Amino acid sequence: MCASGQGGSPPRIYAAQSVNPMTSPTRLHDESLVIDAHSDVHLDLIRSRAAGERRVFEERHVPGWRAGGVDGIVLSTIPKFGPDPYPYRTSPAENLLYMLDCVHQEISESPDQLQLVLEPDDFRKARADGKIGIMLGCEGAEPIADLSHLRSYHRLGLRALTLTWHQRNAVGDGVSEPSGSGLSHFGRAVVEESNRLGIVLDVSHAGAATLRDTLEMSSVPVIASHSNARALCDHERNLADDELRAIASSGGLIGVTLLGRFVAPETPTIHHVLDHIDHMVRVVGWEHVAFGTDYTTGGADLVIGSRRVAGPNQPVDHTTIPYAAGLETYAELPALTHGMLDRGHDHQAVRRLLGENFVSLFEAVVAGSAG
């Protein structure tokens, strides 16, 4: 575990620019670095490009990102949807390779709008150049059958790895597995190699034992990019307070997510999201909180169709993916800043949550790889 004094120094937090405490919420949001630590928007991208469309991000998604003040996004493709076949390609490895290629193509087609993020400073460079930084991730380690695969994906730009989705894979158990096993021997090797390469490890979706083992194995901080507080919403994908503290003690982050079923059991709203932020700040402090929307803009039906992972006899809603009311699209993200300020949160702390904390985590991961 990379706690202070154990396994390395805690990550340096980027110093936020000086902010006038009288700055309006809208101006504060506009002046802040805003990074979504987890998005599934690529689902629309890979289907649309397979159908022959081009410049999908620029034409359908960039306007919403800009309306929401978004400067950077981590796109984490799901290479294997539970027990169901993936709708595009024949194997998890082919799925991931196709997504990586799609994003590279999009960036080459819209060079004045998009920039590939390979290093922490790339987020800031993209913002300074009026572009949106795109960081490539993978949600589930199914495409990695050998460490050489991980190294190859890294060469293609992969910089974030969610170790599991709901189910078990060769790395470890996902949160929906009943066995409660942690990292496998291979999973431990994947953690070590990811640390060496400078790949951000994501423990959202990990089972409790997998999360624990990852924190013990990793020499750098990790993130739970889209998980809320179980104390406020008792869902298997949310984190108990001791898990929040364990991630924070590694120097890591928890990304508050906007997906409704992780926000509140009934009628989730922006106020419930703010409650999760308040709770996490009380438990672990501002420097360990970020946000990951889990938006599926344009591809929600694909996720809905995958929900057999819950089990064939489990009732699931196959019609919609509800997000917290008031935060249902990227364009509504400034309301999150307004809400945090309305609740009396400090301007500097709000800037940290919006994006500075994520850049700091990424910086610590890259610094650890060099050591």
Image (cartoon, rainbow, N blue to C red):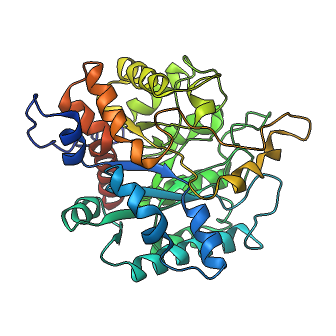
* Residue 139 position within the rendered picture, expressed as x and y whole percent measured from the top left: 60, 54
Q: Based on the displayed image, in which of its 4 quarters is residue 144 positioned? A: bottom right
Judged left or right of residue 233, residue 15 is left
Q: Based on the displayed image, in which of its 4 quarters is residue 318 positioned? A: top right
Which quadrant of the figure contains the N terminus? top left
Viewer-proximal residue among 368 and 141:
141
Judged left or right of residue 318, residue 28 is left
Q: Is residue 170 visible?
A: no
Identify the residue at image location x=35%, y=23%: 281
Judged left or right of residue 220, residue 202 is right
Residue located farthest toward the right when viewing the structure as drawn: 313
Identify the residue at image location x=7%, y=33%: 20
**Image vertical order of residue 237 relative to residue 319, above or below:** above
Viewer-proximal residue among 276 and 209:
276
Viewer-proximal residue among 155 and 181:
155
* Residue 215 position within the rendered picture, expressed as x and y whole percent measured from the top left: 50, 38
**Image vertical order of residue 59 relative to residue 20, above or below:** below
* Residue 273 position within the rendered picture, expressed as x and y whole percent measured from the top left: 46, 27
Identify the residue at image location x=11%, y=43%: 17
**Image vertical order of residue 60 relative to residue 238, above or below:** below
* Residue 41 position within the rendered picture, expressed as x and y whole percent measured from the top left: 54, 58
Viewer-proximal residue among 118 and 5:
118
Which quadrant of the figure contains the C terminus? bottom left
Judged left or right of residue 184, residue 228 is left
Q: How many marks?
A: 0
Q: Can residue 325 be seen in this view?
A: yes
Identify the residue at image location x=17%, y=34%: 24
